[in-house]
Amino acid sequence: MNSKKPGRRRFLKEGAALAGLAVGAIRSASGQTLAPETPAGKPKDTLAYGERSQFVNSLRIGTNGRYGMDNPELPRASRDYGIRTPLQDSVGIITPSSLHFIVSHGYDSPNIDPRQHRLLIHGLVDRPLSFTLEELERLPSVSRIHFVECAGNSTASGAVFVPGAARVAPTGTVQQVHGLTSCSEWTGVLLSLLLREAGVKNGATWIIAEGAEQGMHIKSIPLEKALDDVLVAYGMNGEPVRPQQGYPLRLLVPGWEGINNVKWLRRIKVVDQPYMGMRESTRYPSLRVDGKARWFQFEMGPKSVILRPSGGQKLSGPGFHQITGLAWSGGGMIRRVEVSTDGGRTWKDAAIQGPVHSKAHTRFRLDWNWNGEETVLQSRCTDERNEVQPTVAEVGKIYGVNLTADFFKERPDTLIHFNAIQSWRVNRDGSVQNVFA
Amino acid sequence: MNSKKPGRRRFLKEGAALAGLAVGAIRSASGQTLAPETPAGKPKDTLAYGERSQFVNSLRIGTNGRYGMDNPELPRASRDYGIRTPLQDSVGIITPSSLHFIVSHGYDSPNIDPRQHRLLIHGLVDRPLSFTLEELERLPSVSRIHFVECAGNSTASGAVFVPGAARVAPTGTVQQVHGLTSCSEWTGVLLSLLLREAGVKNGATWIIAEGAEQGMHIKSIPLEKALDDVLVAYGMNGEPVRPQQGYPLRLLVPGWEGINNVKWLRRIKVVDQPYMGMRESTRYPSLRVDGKARWFQFEMGPKSVILRPSGGQKLSGPGFHQITGLAWSGGGMIRRVEVSTDGGRTWKDAAIQGPVHSKAHTRFRLDWNWNGEETVLQSRCTDERNEVQPTVAEVGKIYGVNLTADFFKERPDTLIHFNAIQSWRVNRDGSVQNVFA
């Protein structure tokens, strides 16, 4: 890609590099005008910024210990937490920002003053660039609805949790097992625009993205993806990205495993080979049939899960029940969701009951009359590339292992990108249990 | 419509009327499982339910007094407030639930215990029905992205405010003038499904919806609309509807003036003529050319407004600026948005830069190089019926009056459904001012 080719629109002037942006900045009147005084010690002013009803108590959870940051014997940088979205309570496709899942490797979210924050783009470029948040907000922006999902989702083996327990335990809930996925409307600048402004040099093939947190997470991403649909996002569901999601800036890499979506983004280096960051070499590679590791996996496969009824819930009795759930795929749009109410013997097409966007949570529904007998509920989805969500056995074949419950307990960290069909058993008393099959 | 015609799907059993629903109910595990203990006196647990960065301070405002509930000489039922969304800070199309506009007539939001709340459907029906929230949540649901807009939006004359001030004052900001519109993903049950279950009798032509607040707001809605796309909504942006938006239930009447979207919904009566509720006869009728009032207006016309730059903001200097704004129409999808950077002499097509949904906020953008001279920015939109947003003069013609600034100041309450093109003047020093023209 040659940044100097004529006819390409330029937002920056030559020579603007490092000295900042030559675009005009707007001083916003917001916050100055009529902001209500909030007397100290008084209750929060919910007319200025609202809150939930006191009767609503849906919360994020960790699967073990309070939040999973629970192994003081490990060095801090190796301690992780995976805080899960309460999918069982969700409606529609948007995850409330206050309930977006959080995976953090070793450290709490930094409290970044946006006036001090810069995004540096350098490496194999013609003009290194540095941006303030305000400068980025003045550039042409896009808004897109996308899911973000941790590569370890649906194994409940993310880190120091009891190995594989929730995924194979009868008590496993949908929040414990599948709660490391969320979906938001993200707003920001296409990374391709920034890279074109910087002028990518011949020979460049990867970018390295770096976060500003204490652990300085870095991630290697192929240049081809960086020039496709990757966003430098400052907005999330209509307001600034939340601190635990990367305020003031995060990378949003649609459809790819969560670890790519670098939070508190401060640096993008254009390079000619991937770096072996800590999260390239540990935890994120997965099994190959020959026993070696599969590195640099990226795209999340098609997955769906029934949220209601799901593990830990209880049907009051036979009769009409709405089965509702979510489907998503890193490969694009969800084209079809099928639901089985007889343990996979027969399948019915579910209704898609909300907005459908590419690489986004997609809500499905099936009306069901339960006859009161024990049965197993399952869902499977198909994306726009006609890739179909696999069974547990089919995933085992891909990885070359026999995916028994014991395997899950013994080697949980070897399993990522686990998009197998989820089964929920409905017992005759109406109780719903996780089954690993 | 005959509820007894064969082949129609029935979710309820005959005889279920008033005694509640015969569908199965699910006892959710949410809230029971692993909810973290929050020790009294400790800071709120933001890992369980997140908050904004301390550096983000966008807030809702009233346009006069703290929130506009500021005229103690009026009886309480006549005192209104209109609390406005900070549109100037918004990104994308979703309004954060904490920043959704609030119009309340006389009373604060009730604090409703959902276990005590019922929705009654009665009147000209075969089977009166009563629903708990839990019962409604078990019925087939839909999720849709729609705006809600107060009929008095864009006049800044909603109630007891200084008449028309913000709409014609040079200091008027986009939040003050246009902040009574917001957009959310709404989830609930189609009202048509509930009405079919109840069995609408021959001769029925209207419904009367009633709220549970102290003021007991009622609104008449034609049966034809009620059977079209109206939702009984319990979800908003992925979580329960917020208290100020009607928790636990509100009517969502897509594309129609805000007053129809009855909050804290507790009763729907099917009738054969509209009721003259307080909000049918006062404030909501508008001018006719013959001097009489136009009653029972419903649909909001096509409207767009530039949010950045807008009144009260300041451009730092000539150069590149992104012009960004929102367009919406009660008539369906936005097909086109044009922007003028020379006071309406020439128009350019703006880019649509986010999800496009029917009767929803739609984000547009135009890249602009400001030459430093004084100019006026405008936007106008066209919806899928090819209805084009009018100028102020064109709106005046429809209403049969000369819409001067003085008219606005003297007779603000006669103007609703005001969807005229908004003009922002950019002065040579970069300051941006509201102009009424």
Image (cartoon, coloured by chain):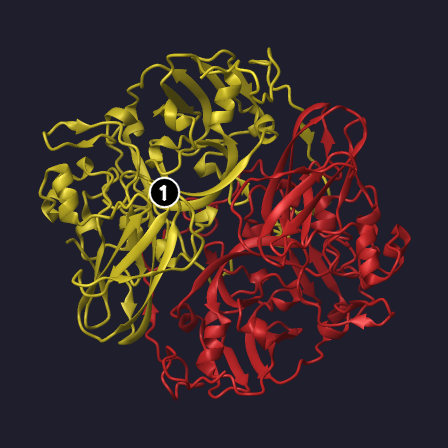
Chain colours: A yellow, B red
Residue occupying image coordinates x 48% and y 21%: A195
Left or right: residue A7 versus residue A89 is right
Q: Is residue B111 visible?
A: no
Quarter of the image holding residue A75? Answer: top left
For the view shown, which residue lies furthest in the front direction?
Answer: B386
Seen in the picture, residue B409 relative to B138 is either above or below; the reply is: above
Seen in the picture, residue A255 relative to B203 is either above or below; the reply is: above
Q: Is residue B283 visible?
A: yes
B275 or B401: nearer the viewer:
B401
Which residue type carries mark 1? Gly
Expressed as whole percent of the image width and height from the top left, the position of residue A93 reads: 42, 52
Expressed as whole percent of the image width and height from the top left, the position of residue A420 reads: 21, 48
Q: Chain of mark 1?
A: A
Expressed as whole percent of the image width and height from the top left, the position of residue A69 reads: 31, 38
Q: Which residue is mark 1?
A: A332
Left or right: residue A401 versus residue A92 is left
Residue count near mark 1 (Cα–Cα under 10 Å), binned few <14, some 14–19, many ≥20: some
Residue occupying image coordinates x 45% and y 21%: A267
Left or right: residue B428 versus residue B17 is right
A159 or B395: nearer the viewer:
B395
A318 or A114: nearer the viewer:
A318
Indicate the secondary structure of the residue bearing disc 1. Answer: loop
Seen in the picture, residue B140 relative to A126 is either above or below; the reply is: below
Quarter of the image holding residue B291? Answer: bottom right
